[in-house]
Amino acid sequence: MKLRMIGIDHNRAPVEVRERYAFTNAAARVVMQTGKLQNTVTFFHRDCAGTEQLQNTNGIRGCVLLSTCNRMELYVSLAPEAEPDLYALICGWKGIAPGPERALFYEKKDLEAARHLFELASGLCSQIMGEDQILSQVKDALMLAREESATDNCIEVLFRQAITAAKEVRSSISFDKGNRSAATAAIQKLQKAGAVFVGKQALVIGNGRMGRLTAQALMEAGAQVTVTVRQYHSGMVDIPEGAMRINYGGRYEKLADADYIFSATASPNLTITPERLTGICLSGKVFVDLAVPRDIDPAVGELPGGRLLCMDDLGMEQLSIEQQEQKERAQEKIAEALAEFERFFNGRDLIPRIEKIADAAADDLWGRMRKDCSKLEDGQRRHVEEAVRRSGSKVAAHILFALRDGLDTDAFARCMNILEGK
């Protein structure tokens, strides 16, 4: 079993490149289905084009795809003999011809890949050190992969331990609270340039996690905030107390009265285009795009009177002495947590044996159920068989891995020998 990761982030590539490799949740589901389960997938999303033939000979046994405003990263566990070209796979999923942008990606193997995830989840790789969102984003990416049955034991242990380590870092180290979100960073950047928010009108497009954080930050800065809500969600959306709401379709009418327009959605579609701004006076208005792929057409920034900021305009300030000390303390704690994953990873030679026993258990389970399913139609029977084998294998593997983690090495080795009939 091998561990690999590939990624691109704000340190290596500008937003116009990063957005080419960004994935919505819907597209991420397709990718993880493709990488783990399906042989042929037709892509229907804006950010996935064409039909990609992927055979399960790529050796991917588990995968998680993380796509945020500042980065896209793919983590995979591989069969021992597998060495897939992960950049080429991503290009295939995105409908992009592989090219010189490969140089903008970073790739890490085994324990270095693990170390990177541990530091990432702890906020040490973020544009704003110690920012709060990345841990939730890592959790969400893992959950999405689980829902698509795309994880295996190696990926599960890696992400579970990285999340645990990040929680420990955050509970024991108080990072400088100056900039804890992209929205806060944007507001502070504007304030340094002389912007005033008290009593001003602010429109926030998007009511997801980022939209709510943005609305809250603007209200704390003194602005009067209105949040867009999709019409079919208008009765059940949680927005910060004190903020007003309008239907998403009325955003341009509200925009005409707004001083600040922040867009922070996960939609693959543009929320503001220059064509729709015709007749609206933009003098003094500030547009802030906190999404990747970008929500606001970059051409808006070329219109007379207005100003447009995107994620790359927020910048990354040099760490203070205190922040550098906080980072070093966090890395020490991460090193301690990483040692536990290293013990697990160094015992990975047992994984093929465990998986073989788990597969045998799944075969036995299906053998016992086959007769009961004989009256089903062929398609239904195949579907049930696939579900039974997959679930049976996962349950058996879970039990065996729990035994491995709970027994000493010699005792577990004896258990394995008994199960293998040795």
Image: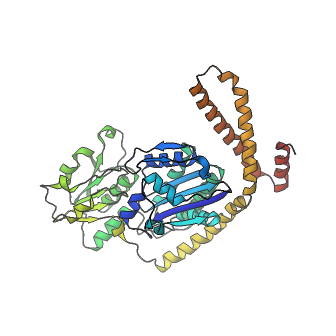
Q: Is residue 247 visible?
A: no
Seen from this angle, which residue lies furthest top? Answer: 375
Residue 29, given in percent of the width and then of the height, sits at 48, 46
Which residue is rendered at x = 61% and y = 49% of the image?
Answer: 57
Total marks placed = 0
Which residue is rendered at x = 48% and y = 56% of the image?
Answer: 90
Judged left or right of residue 257, residue 392 is: right
The answer to whether 230 is drawn above or below residue 218 in the figure is above
Name the residue nearer the viewer: 173 or 301: 301
Judged left or right of residue 420, residue 73 is: left
Which residue is rendered at x = 55% and y = 49% of the image?
Answer: 35
Seen from this angle, which residue lies furthest right? Answer: 422
Name the residue nearer the viewer: 58 or 60: 58
- The quarter of the picture where the N terminus appears is bottom right
Residue 261, given in percent of the width and then of the height, sits at 25, 58
Toward which corner of the image does residue 16 lie, by quadrant?
bottom left
Seen from this angle, which residue lies furthest bottom? Answer: 321
Coloration mode: rainbow
Seen from this angle, which residue lies furthest left? Answer: 279
Toward which corner of the image does residue 396 lie, by quadrant?
top right
Residue 374, given in percent of the width and then of the height, sits at 65, 21
Name the residue nearer the viewer: 246 or 36: 36
Q: Is residue 334 visible?
A: yes
Name the residue nearer the viewer: 274 or 326: 274
Which residue is rendered at x = 64% and y = 63% of the image?
Answer: 110
Residue 19, given in percent of the width and then of the height, sits at 38, 59
